[in-house]
Amino acid sequence: MKRSGFYMHIEGFEGFDRNLDFDKAQIRRGMRRAGSVVTKEARRLVSRRRVSRPGEYPGKGTGRLARSIRARVSRSGFLVKIEPKTGGDVPASDPYFVYLHYGVRRGARRRKDHKAQPAGPWRIEPRENYPADALQNRAAEVRSILGAALAAGLRVR
């Protein structure tokens, strides 16, 4: 199953020579801060207390989805992953946020090649992609945070 969520990463270091180095602690700190900004915005988008309609952001019933949204920095420090944490009530094999984003058809069956066979009307109609929209809403702030982190973490020997 394809996972919904959003990944932020830094690209384009191919043109640099070996005299350029990054202080990974500074980069990780900036990525953590940018992830925190986007996480707060994503939580805000799904925290309206209402029943959501198709095409809207998921509504808040118990608040479990909003509380589960996390930002994880990769081991290298150049990637932040923002998605709801699976586990607890939701096993890792059944991430509910994927069902919300892509929707579920009633009576759908899996084939041997793992492609879903759509059947019948929608059981859960697709909702909006709140992590991607949260990044888009805070793009200027994230860009300034990451720019400052890269400037602080850049070391030229």
Image: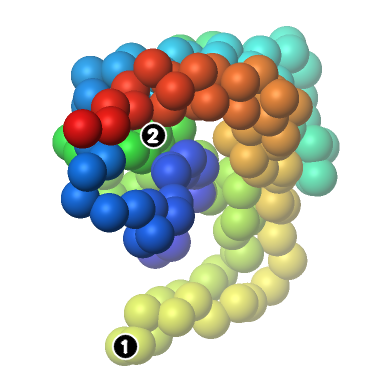
In the rendered image, which quarter contains the N terminus?
Answer: bottom left
Closest to the observer, 47 or 106: 47
Q: Nearer the viewer, residue 2 or 134?
A: 134
Q: Is residue 17 above or below residue 138?
A: below
Q: Nearer the viewer, residue 113 or 20?
A: 20
Q: Going from the N terminus, do you reach mark 2 or mark 1 first?
A: 2
**Label 1 secondary element:** loop
Q: Farthest residue toward the bottom?
A: 112
Identify which residue is drawn at 31% across, 88% down: 112
Please tell me in which quadrant of the rendered image residue 37 appears: top right
Q: Residue at x 63, y 77 (%)?
A: 119
Q: Secondary structure at mark 2?
A: strand
Q: Residues within 10 Å of mark 1 (few under 14, many from 20)?
A: few
Q: Label 2 is placed on what type of residue? A: Val
In the image, what residue type sits under mark 1? Lys
Vertical relation: 141 (above or below) 14: above
Residue 144 position in % (x across, y down): 61, 20
Tell me the crowding category of disc 2: few under 14, some 14 to 19, or many 20 or more residues within 10 angstroms, Cα based. Answer: many
What residue is drawn where x is 68% and y is 72%?
A: 120
| Res 88 quadrant in image | top left
The residue depicted at 79 percent of the width and 44 percent of the height is 54
Residue denoted by label 1:
112
**Residue 48 visible in the current orientation:** yes
Vertical comparison of 68 with 131: above or below: above
Please say if 14 is above or below 157: below
Identify the residue position indicated by label 2 in the image. 80
Q: Is residue 79 left or right of residue 34?
A: left
Position in image of residue 143 (x %, y %): 61, 28
On the image, the x and y values in percent for residue 113 come to 34, 88
Q: Is residue 60 visible?
A: no
Percent position of residue 99, x then y: 53, 49
